[in-house]
Image: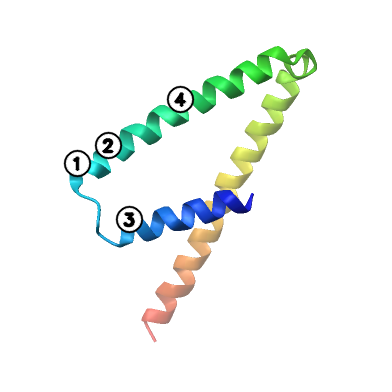
Amino acid sequence: MEIVFISMFLGILLGLSKRLSEKNVALLSQLAQYSLFAMLISLGAIIGSDSSLVSKLDILGAKSLLIAALSMFFGVLILAITLKIFKQGDNL
């Protein structure tokens, strides 16, 4: 997992260094999109080949939907509270 964070950190540093031209940024964006598609296809193939996972997709889907909905709800709630706190601080 460390390699993921190190790679992300190095990419951020490269982006902040302003050494990439607009053409290179566009090329990297396309490369990232195609890589994401390849990973999703691979993940789908892995899930499709595991019969125990396929049989539990309805349960896993419902749980995933619940987690996503609760994450959005509480994210918006925390944002609203934070904005209210900072808005009150500006009036002081």
User: Which of the two labelled residues, at mark 4 and mark 2, occupies the earlier sequence position?
Assistant: 2
Q: Position of residue 88 (x, y in %)?
A: 43, 77
Residue at x 32% of width, y 61% of height: 16
User: Which of the two labelled residues, at mark 4 and mark 3, occupies the earlier sequence position?
Assistant: 3
Q: Please, is residue 57 above or below residue 10 in the view? A: above
Decide: marks 2, 3 in contact (CB < 8 A)?
Answer: no
How far apart marks 2 and 3 lie (CA) works out to 13 Å
Q: Return the mark for residue 27.
A: 2
Q: Is residue 87 left or right of residue 51?
A: left
How far apart marks 1 and 2 lie (CA) works out to 6 Å
Local secondary structure at mark 1: helix
Instruction: State the residue position of label 4.
Output: 37
Local secondary structure at mark 2: helix
User: Which of the two labelled residues, at mark 4 and mark 1, occupies the earlier sequence position?
Assistant: 1
Local secondary structure at mark 3: helix
Decide: marks 1, 2 in contact (CB < 8 A)?
Answer: yes
How far apart marks 4 and 3 lie (CA) works out to 23 Å
Instruction: State the residue position of label 3.
Output: 15
Q: Position of residue 55 (x, y in %)?
A: 77, 14
Q: Position of residue 73 (x, y in %)?
A: 57, 47
Residue extending farthest to the bottom is: 92
Q: How is the image coloured?
A: rainbow
Q: Return the mark for residue 23.
A: 1
Decide: marks 4, 2 in contact (CB < 8 A)?
Answer: no
How far apart marks 1 and 3 lie (CA) works out to 13 Å
Q: Is residue 45 left or right of residue 41?
A: right
Residue at x 74% of width, y 16% of height: 50
Give whichever of 19, 55 is nearer the camera.
Answer: 19
Residue kind at label 3, given as amino acid type = Gly
Residue kind at label 1, given as amino acid type = Lys
Local secondary structure at mark 4: helix
